[in-house]
Amino acid sequence: MSAILKISQLSLCLRYAGISERILRGISLAIDSGEVHGLVGESGAGKSILGQTILDILPRIAVIESGTIDFDGQNLLRLAPTQRRGLLGSEIALIPQDPMTALNPVRRIGQQLADTLVLHLKLNRKDALDRACELLEEVRIKHPRRALRQYPHELSGGMRQRVLIAIAFSCKPRLIVADESTTALDVSVQRQILRLIRELQVSSGTSILFITHDLGVVAKICDRVSIIHSGRILESDAVKRIFSMPEHEYTRALLKATPRYDHGKHQFRPIPKALISTLQLEAKEYDRRIRDSVDA
Amino acid sequence: MTTRYLLNRLLLALPTLFGVVTVVFILLRVVPGDPIAMMTGPGATPEDIQHLRAHYGLDRSLSAQFVIYLGQLAMGDLGTSISLRQDVGELILGRLPVTLELTVFAMLIAIGCGVCLAIVGSYWRSRWPEAIIDSVIGIIVAIPDFLWALAFILILGVVIPVMPIFGRLDLALEYQSYTEFYLIESALRGRFDVTGSVLWHMILPGVALALPLMAVGARVLKSSLNVEMTQDYAALAHTKGFSRLQVILKEALRNALIPAVTLTGVQLTFLIGGTVLIERIFGYPGLGNMAIDAVINRDLPLIQGIIITFAIIFILVNFLIDLINTILNPRLRDG
């Protein structure tokens, strides 16, 4: 299988008030077409920033220092703004984290679904709304006709997340970035939503970069997984392999820190502080090497 | 539910109006100044004065005067002007259209320019256009409307005399109006020479009135636009493939307008109040200009009538702002 997304040596820092802090340190990652790739890390590991870099929604203070993001053979970071916008929504889409805030509170669901259809598929208003209705059926929203005319505050969190999934899949993109897409939902809704995403992904052949801090979610939906810490990918492998024989010490600690109920003898243990400081030291070491190579 | 909410709002306006009537009535009789003394010459005998007092009902007790006044009000009778000896209601209706046309014209300038400035400033966030807009807004906010009026008269009326600075219509033009709404009426009747002249005369007073409202509105709208642009839905809109301008216009603007409309609503009442001075400065024959004459002549019935008219306009403006917010914000429509 060929890679649909190939990130190489991506480094990024946040610059604010003269202080520069490196967030991504030489990230390399490849996602095959049709693959669901998990990106797992703690808060502050840089996983969301990586998603934002792909989607071109970085905060103003973020500066990309080096690296490439090849999507379908073209480097996204080198594209003209209009070309990049042409890919967004049609080829690359987002399933956001918080269904409560990701929909515009003053626009009807139908209008928000129709946006990409009008913009990229050049449908007229009426056809777009008809198509939006079909999309809502596909994500199993009851009474899709009525939902089209409703406002976000009239739907539950799970329903809104379904709408957001419908928006993401509306133009059959080749890559979807799912940024903590099930974190804000309760466990039973989470399971339904994961199943729905998986189903739509299989039928459309879309690749997904699934950003999460939850290894349980990874086990349910991902084919492969990368472990990220301090802006570095520590390990990248098939999910089964990572779960059965993790190579990196941090991955092993992460697995132990995940509560499991299917395993009698499994003991929950927090990640050792010594390991965290070793990782942070390694990150500092990386920054020093970069600085030295620039100075030299 | 919505209609009931709005009806409630209108009903709540009645006590407000009663309060205004009471306060104005009492205040006008507490402050020094005697309308009869203002209208009679130095040669008037005490009998003449007594006779006039009786004629205008000023010889009765304050409470009796108030009850009579309320009774007349309830019948829609605002009394008779002491200085002009005409029916106050008719006087006001003759001047109100003049002021309304000027106010609406100023409002349209303020809202149009304010929204444009806010969008431009937010589009070029943290770049030089925003810096320029911020400083221009700062200057405009700092200067009150009547100073703008004087500056315009000095610069565009005296130093480079290109604009008319007095009156409502070119004196050379003959025009018989039925409704006093010169601008609309003349346009409908095809007298475009009159329409043009009325518009031309409106520009300076209108812009002077509009500037403070425009600046405050632009400032509030721009900062709330900037906040909305950092919201999750704006980021999602960007990942849909919208350009920055599309995100502002299609997604952020309507959300940003909600706080902006509420806050500028307050400023809008300042604009209406501002007509009093501005009309005076430009010799504009509106309600505000008449209000100053009424105060100078201690014309109690006329002052009362004008203030009640302004109060009704304020109440209607606030009601309208509530209505606009309900339209803008679907979350306000239930409950």
Image: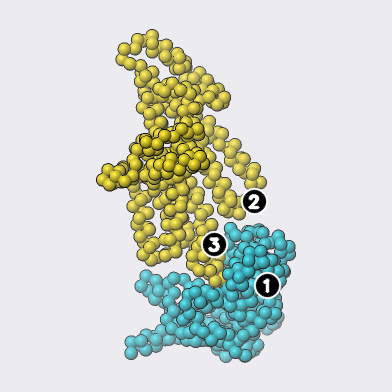
Chain colours: A cyan, B yellow
Residue closest to the eye, A253 or B192: B192
Q: Residue at x 53, y 40 (%)?
A: B316
Residue sitting at the far left: B159
Secondary structure, mark 2, is loop
Mark 2 or mark 3: which is in front? 3
In the image shown, does B294 or B26 lie closer to the viewer?
B294
Which amino acid lies under the numbered mark 1 shown in the image of this protein?
Answer: Ile
Residue B323 percent location from the top left of the image = 57, 46
The Cα–Cα distance between marks 1 and 2, rounded to whole angstroms, is 29 Å
**Badge number at residue B230:** none
Q: Position of residue B9 (x, y in %)?
A: 58, 40
How far is disc 3 from disc 1 in space, using C-alphas? 29 Å
Which residue bears the numbered disc 1?
A: A193
Disc 1: CA contacts within 10 A as few (<14), some (14-19) or many (>=20): many
Q: Dot 1 lies on which element?
A: helix
Question: Which residue carries the number 2 mark?
Answer: B334
**Quick check: marks 1 and 2 in contact, CB under 8 Å?**
no
* Helix, strand or loop status at disc 3: helix
Considering every residue shown, the one lying at the far right of the view is A142
Query: Which residue lies under the disc numbered 3?
Result: B250
